[in-house]
Structure formats: C-alpha cells, structure tokens
Amino acid sequence: MAEIKIDDSQLKDMIAKAVIDSLTPESRTELITNAVKMLLGRKTGNAYDSRSELQVAFDNAVRNVAHEIALEHVKQPEMMEAINKIVAEAVKRALNLDSDAFNAMADKMADAIRRAITGERY
C-alpha cells in the first residue's frame, strides 16, 4: 500500500480551505471580522513595543520599500562617487599613519593576533 505524505504547510492549507468552504457567508464574514480585530488588538513585543501585529507588518512593509528606494538612489553613479570620496577621506583620517593613535591601534591589533595564534589569554 502506498503511503501518502503531506507536508505541514500543505496540510494547514487544506484544513483552512475545508473550514472556509464549510462556513456560511454570515459565519465567514464573522470569522474574517474577528480575525482582523485580533490582528489589530493583539500586541507584540514587550511593554516598550505595544504595536499590534498589523502595525508591525505595516511598519516592516514601509521599511522594506524605503530600503529599496534608498538602494536605488545610492546605486546611482554620482551617489556612489560621493560615498566613495567620503569613505576614502574617513579612512584616511582614521588611519593617519603618522599619529600616535595609529601606532597604538596597530600595537593592539598585533597583540590580539599574537594572542589568537598562541592561545594566550589576557
């Protein structure tokens, strides 16, 4: 006898369809209304984040769209050139080869590498 295997996602979809198909139009409306109320009312996170699940979903969608738009702008050649100039200048300033801070940073990095190789701990 052949064994039928249905994964969890398919099973949930089948059950959801069977439940929806078995409802009257009135009970289907009531179910959807109550589901939306629950999404609007249920809070996520903790006391510092009292947004509903629907608010969280909306916030995430807006954040994703804003990220895509920003990425499109940043990828423009003139923006890439400006960003490259700023980063190059920042790195140049951070790694001022003649400064005591640079030498101290190099000493600490060398010490960290030595400890990683030898297994020595502080």
Image (cartoon, grey):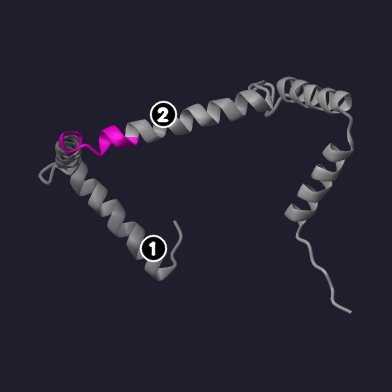
Residue 36, by quadrant, is top right
As for residue 21 lying within the magenta part, the answer is no
* Left or right of 27, for residue 110: left
Question: Looking at the image, which residue sits at the far bottom?
Answer: 1
- Circle 2 sits in a helix, a strand or a loop, which is it? helix
* 45 lies above or below 95: above
* 117 lies above or below 23: below
Quick one: 110 or 50, which is closer to the camera?
50
Q: Position of residue 44 (x, y in %)?
A: 69, 28
The image's mark for residue 115 is 1
Q: Main secondary structure of the magenta part?
A: helix
Residue at the disc numbered 2: 66
Q: Quadrant of the C terminus?
A: bottom left
For the point 44% across and 31% down, the residue is 65
Q: Position of residue 52 (x, y in %)?
A: 68, 23
Q: Which residues are magenta?
A: 71-79
Q: Position of residue 21 (x, y in %)?
A: 84, 39
- Circle 1 sits in a helix, a strand or a loop, which is it? helix
If you read the primary sequence from the N terminus, does the residue marked by circle 2 or circle 1 appear first? 2
Quick one: 85 or 35, which is closer to the camera?
35
- CA gap between label 2 and label 1 equals 44 Å
The amino acid pointed to by label 2 is Ala
For the point 67% across and 20% down, the residue is 50
Task: Please rate how many residues cluster around mark 1, counting C-alpha atoms within 10 Å: few if below 14, some from 14 to 19, many from 20.
Answer: few
* 38 lies above or below 10: above
Q: Position of residue 77 (x, y in %)?
A: 17, 39
- For marks 2 and 1, give the one nearer the viewer: 2
The amino acid pointed to by label 1 is Arg
